[in-house]
Amino acid sequence: MKPPKFDYLRPATVPEAIDALVAAEGGGKIIAGGQSLMPMLNFRLLNPTVLIDINRIAELSSFREEDGGLRIGSLTRHHKLETSDAVKRLFPVLNAAMAHVAHLAIRNRGTIGGSITHADPAAELPMMMVLLESEITIATPRGSRVVAAEDFFLGALTSAVEEDELVTEIYLPALPPNAGWAFEEVARRAGDFALAAVGVIMTVEDGRVTHSRVGVMGVGDTPLRLFDVETVLYDEACEGGILDQAIEVARASVAPATDLHASADYRRHLLGVLVKRALQTAWLRANGKDVASGSSSSGGHHHE
Ligand SMILES: Cc1cc2nc3c(=O)[nH]c(=O)nc-3n(C[C@H](O)[C@H](O)[C@H](O)COP(=O)(O)OP(=O)(O)OC[C@H]3O[C@@H](n4cnc5c(N)ncnc54)[C@H](O)[C@@H]3O)c2cc1C
């Protein structure tokens, strides 16, 4: 199908884009990479009066290290996150997750701002935002505001971004030193959205977990942190009975839906398997063991 008719604007600055959104009185839609928006227009799921193309706004492509973390513009492409040396060094878990996003052609166009605003519950970047405790800056007609990732994802395909607002940048704060990490995902075919995925960050001292974060996706309306699992792990060795307990708590913490792709029971079971693998890998890495980079999930990935 073809998209409905709309006007098209290409502002040069953030204030111009905001003015255009305000003038459209709810009928305006930002277009970034267009990889989610265009299919929705073609299927006539959306009917905007005006598309506001932000690709010419130079500041939205900024990318720099700051205080051991990264401050990146909302137009940063998936491919940049996948190939950047700074991402590999500072956030290897993010680098690993990016290989699972769609296909190369989509990663060349898709942007971090588009992905997180679109807020697909099975998309990798929203989960990474929650796992990495990112801070999201949103330009509004009344100045800008910063929203923690934890408060950004409100529901399936619903983020905290209002219709007259624009995501400008994302800050990923530094991880603790020597953090172990892991990313595990299962999708039916290479490039498909995940059935479920798990990301872990973990630090260890004297054989005990001093800090952990467990992020999951595909098992609820939004990406989630499993704080109860993190509590189980705290001050313990992530092995044996503690690992079993962590898996049990993970499965009990989620309420996945049955849909076309998988049943709720299957997703819950799968989540436990992925949590186990991810915790084992992160534990090894946090203990200084060399584990081959990337995840070892079954199902399709690492295409092209
Ligand atoms: C076949 C296929 C497979 C895919 N598989 C995956 C996958 O496995 N994992 C995955 O994560 N994604 C997947 N995607 C989605 C892809 O990653 C999209 O590129 C991404 O979700 C949206 O980014 P975009 O820049 O293209 O956004 P757009 O399509 O341009 O916009 C998406 C939405 O966000 C809004 N928006 C965009 N930028 C901003 C901004 N800065 N501020 C406010 N609102 C904004 C738009 O108005 C729109 O509502 C897939 C897409 C396709 C077509």
Image: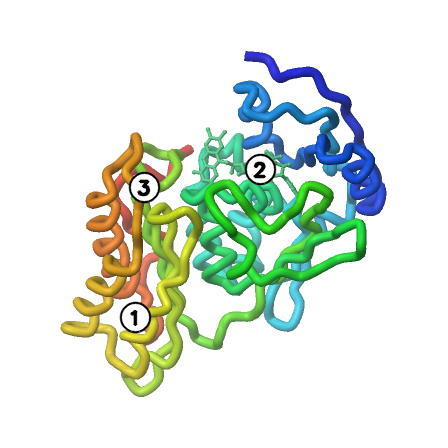
Q: Which residue is mark 1?
A: 283
Give whichever of 115, 289 is nearer the camera: 115
Q: CA distance from mark 2 to mark 1?
A: 32 Å
Q: Quadrant of ligand 1?
A: top right
**Residue 212 spot, x, y in % from top left:** 38, 72
Whichever of labels 3 and 2 marks the residue nearer the N terminus, that label is 2
Give the left or right position of residue 114, taking residue 207 as reference.
Answer: right
Q: Which residue is mark 3?
A: 195
Residue visible at 65% across and 16% down in the picture: 4
Answer yes or no: disc 2 within 8 Å of ligand 1: yes
Three-letter amino acid code at the position of disc 3: Leu
Whichever of labels 2 and 1 marks the residue nearer the N terminus, that label is 2
Q: Residue 110 got which mark?
A: 2
Residue 282 location, quadrant: bottom left
Seen in the picture, residue 21 relative to 141 is either above or below; the reply is above
Visible in this render: residue 143? yes
Seen in the picture, residue 295 relative to 177 is either above or below; the reply is above
Say few, some or many: other residues with alpha carbon within 10 Å of mark 2 (under 14 / 14 to 19 / 20 or more).
Answer: many
Three-letter amino acid code at the position of disc 2: Gly
